[in-house]
Amino acid sequence: MKHRKPTGVGAVGANMTPMIDMVFNLLIFFILTSQFAQLETEEVRLPLSTTATNKDYTEFRNVVINIVERDGAGEIIVFRRPFTPPELTEFLIEAKEKAEGHPMNVILRADAEVPYEDVARVMLATGKAQIQGWWITTEIEKKDELRGGM
């Protein structure tokens, strides 16, 4: 009986192809989902507020409603799609049903130049959908800046 001597330590290699595929899939996923989050907002000049505070919106199912000034009137836009107030009510009722009992919240982003009547129409539409969670987005100004640094 002959005993063979080990000829050397064998190299162990790992196939990196599946890991690279997974990294690219995750990268594509995060790029696409970040773009969907940006679709919720329109270019809006927000009104100024001195008493507003930042909120943690992550605990709610949020619907972002934008009211954009177009020719002196407000246009209601949700997910880059225009809505009339009755269509908005139907959309919110469906969204509330899909939330399946999770707290629902509306984040209103209205242009500073939009007449209040247009904001009131959106408030009534959400009231008809029986959504009580409300946040109105504003630009937060420090009181010192409004007084000219006094």
Image (spheres, rainbow, N blue to C red):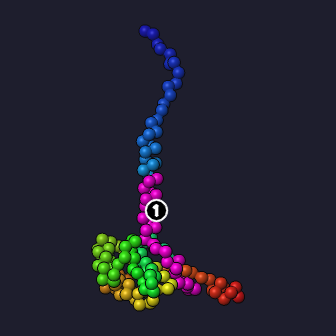
Q: Nearer the viewer, residue 5 or 42?
A: 42
Could you tell whether 24 is left or right of 124 in the image? right
Q: Measuring 43% from the left and 59% from the top, which residue is drawn there? A: 32
Q: Is residue 19 magenta?
A: no
Q: Position of residue 39 (x, y in %)?
A: 43, 68
Amino acid residing under circle 1: Ser
Q: Is residue 102 above or below residue 2?
A: below
State left or right for residue 22 relative to residue 51: left
**Which quarter of the rendered picture does the C terminus lie within?**
bottom right
Residue 32 magenta-drawn?
A: yes
Q: Quadrant of residue 78?
A: bottom left
Residue at 51% in and 18% down: 7
| Nearest the eye: 123 or 78 | 78
Q: Which corner quadrant holds the N terminus?
A: top left
Disc 1: which residue: 34
In magenta, the rendered stretch is: 27-54
